[in-house]
């Protein structure tokens, strides 16, 4: 069993930004990057996309995997120890916090690692619908992030579809309306879940149409390698009538699942399962446990906001460790984990 000051769990922009700050502060962080944790490669969500065009510093854009390789290299450069294993169990009931990896997670196994502070940066996954054709046209017309992908040329002046009835669907549809010829929002029920103000704005938008009681059933498109989607089969949920519509873009806005399995029942989560942090901070309901990135952000979910929150988590962890070092006492505020 190894003990260190601080362990970071995750491998997206949040985790690596925290690692860069903590290693430059000579706190010798250990980062567990996961081995296909939650079905995503080490490096997180950006490894599943092509060009990232809205991360500052790359005026010509940069590949998602390349950006994450660079962040990883920067973490290592300052001395972060990166372990390619998935943390499968975490005990936050007392300090030092204990964690087990997939490889040592037996009922009687010693924890693989203990730490005085933990940063949770496990991210989130956009929900998919598993429609026929989805795998084939994923990122070739289908996306789960309009803000990320909406501006690319394949969507310009083309009919676009959004699935979902929440605030994300409304926001994404209105964002896409800047680029597409028209945006249709498919809502499975007879009402929107979005807040009234967003719903009103969407319903009044001249370039958006909401089709209630309608679901997508199949994505159709070019039959060649890297072919693009061109059509969508949709079905009425009231009379089962189907039709094929022209669609060059399909954006899922059916919610995200924050990767909270490690902390469920230990940290305070909101009604959608996101870790609750004190506003403007990375502080969770347990002292010494910090959260950053998409696992605590259901509103923005961007690489740059994840990176920003990773910086906040590192600075707060650094202060916490310094206070711990000086006093070995509990600090005021959140529920303190008792010291062993
Ligand atoms: P994530 O990227 O969510 O990564 C967390 C990772 O930690 C996991 O994937 C996994 O590898 C690892 N992990 C999880 N659990 C464990 C565990 N128990 N043990 C060890 N490791 C674990 N944002 C933009 O700003 N611009 C874009 O162009 C853009 N394009 C996108 C395209 C796609 C297809 C997707 C899905 C997202 C896109 N985003 C984009 C959003 C962006 O990727 C996320 O906001 C960002 O990656 C979130 O970072 P994060 O630090 O929360 O971690
Ligand atoms: P939500 O969970 O609020 O909405 C998801 C939507 O997807 C619902 O309309 C749901 O339908 C629909 N849906 C789910 N599964 C399917 C499916 N299989 N087929 C078709 N439709 C489906 O997620 P959001 O991402 O929209 O919002 C998450 C949180 O973030 C909310 O609290 C929201 O208020 C907040 N947010 C706020 C914003 C703002 O204030 N501007 C912007 C973005 C998000 P149904 O209603 O039938 O369940």
Image (tube, rainbow, N blue to C red):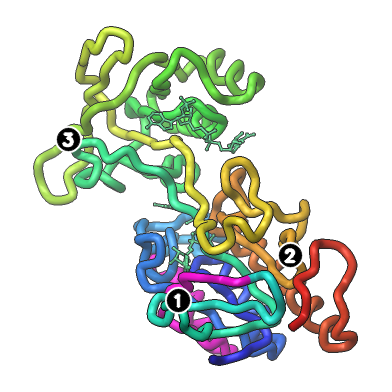
Residue 256, x across and y down, in percent: 48, 45
Mark toward the viewer: 3 or 1:
1
* Position of 226 relative to 314 (above/below): above
The reply to whether residue 177 is in sight is no
- Please tell me how crowded label 2 is: few (under 14), some (14-19), or many (20+) other residues with Cα within 10 Å: some
**Mark closer to the observer (1, 2):** 1
- Labels 2 and 3: the sequence-earlier one: 3
Q: Which residue is mark 2?
A: 286
Residue for point 39% across, 22% down? 186
Q: Is mark 1 within 8 Å of ligand 1?
A: no
Mark 1 or mark 2: name the one nearer the start of the chain: 1
| Membership of 65 in magenta stretch | yes
Q: Quadrant of the N terminus?
A: bottom right
Which residues fall within the magenta stretch? 63-91
Find disc 3 in the rendering and name its residue. Answer: 221
- In the displayed structure, 99 sits above or below 173; it is below
Q: Secondary structure at mark 3?
A: strand
Give how far apart the Cα atoms at labels 3 and 1 are: 50 Å
Camera-side mark, 2 or 3: 2
Image coordinates of residue 90 in percent, x first then y, are 56, 71
Q: Is residue 36 magenta?
A: no
């Amino acid at each position: 069993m190894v003990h260190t000051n601080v362990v970071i769990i995750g491998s997206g922009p949040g985790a690596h930004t925290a690692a860069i700050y903590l290693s430059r502060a000579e706190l010798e962080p250990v980062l567990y990057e996961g081995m296909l944790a939650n079905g995503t490669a080490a490096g997180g969500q950006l490894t599943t996309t092509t060009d990232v065009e809205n991360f500052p510093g790359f005026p010509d854009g940069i590949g998602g995997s390349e950006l994450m390789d660079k962040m990883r290299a920067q973490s290592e450069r300052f001395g972060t120890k990166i372990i390619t294993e998935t943390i499968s169990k975490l005990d936050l009931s007392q300090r030092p916090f204990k964690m087990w990896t997939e490889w040592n997670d037996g009922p009687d196994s010693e924890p693989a690692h203990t730490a005085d502070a933990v940063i949770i940066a496990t991210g989130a996954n956009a929900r998919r619908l598993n429609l026929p054709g989805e795998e084939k046209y994923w990122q070739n017309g289908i996306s789960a992030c309009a803000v990320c992908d909406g501006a690319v040329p394949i969507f310009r002046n083309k009919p676009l579809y959004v699935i979902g009835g929440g605030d994300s669907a409304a926001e994404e549809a209105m964002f896409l309306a800047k680029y597409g010829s028209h945006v249709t929002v498919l809502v499975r029920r007879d009402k929107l879940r979005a807040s009234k103000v967003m719903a009103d704005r969407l319903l009044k938008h001249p370039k958006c149409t909401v089709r209630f009681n309608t679901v997508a059933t199949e994505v159709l498109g070019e039959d060649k390698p890297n072919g693009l989607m061109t059509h969508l089969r949709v079905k009425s949920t009231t009379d089962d009538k189907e039709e094929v519509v022209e669609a060059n873009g399909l954006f899922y806005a059916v919610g995200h699942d924050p990767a909270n399995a490690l902390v469920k029942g230990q940290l305070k989560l909101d009604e959608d399962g996101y870790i609750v942090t004190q506003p403007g901070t990375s502080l969770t309901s347990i002292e010494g446990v910090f959260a950053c990135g998409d696992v605590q952000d259901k509103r923005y979910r961007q690489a740059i906001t994840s990176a920003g929150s990773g910086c906040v988590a590192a600075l707060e962890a650094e202060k916490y460790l310094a206070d711990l070092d000086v006093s070995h006492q509990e600090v005021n505020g959140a529920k303190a984990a008792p010291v062993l």
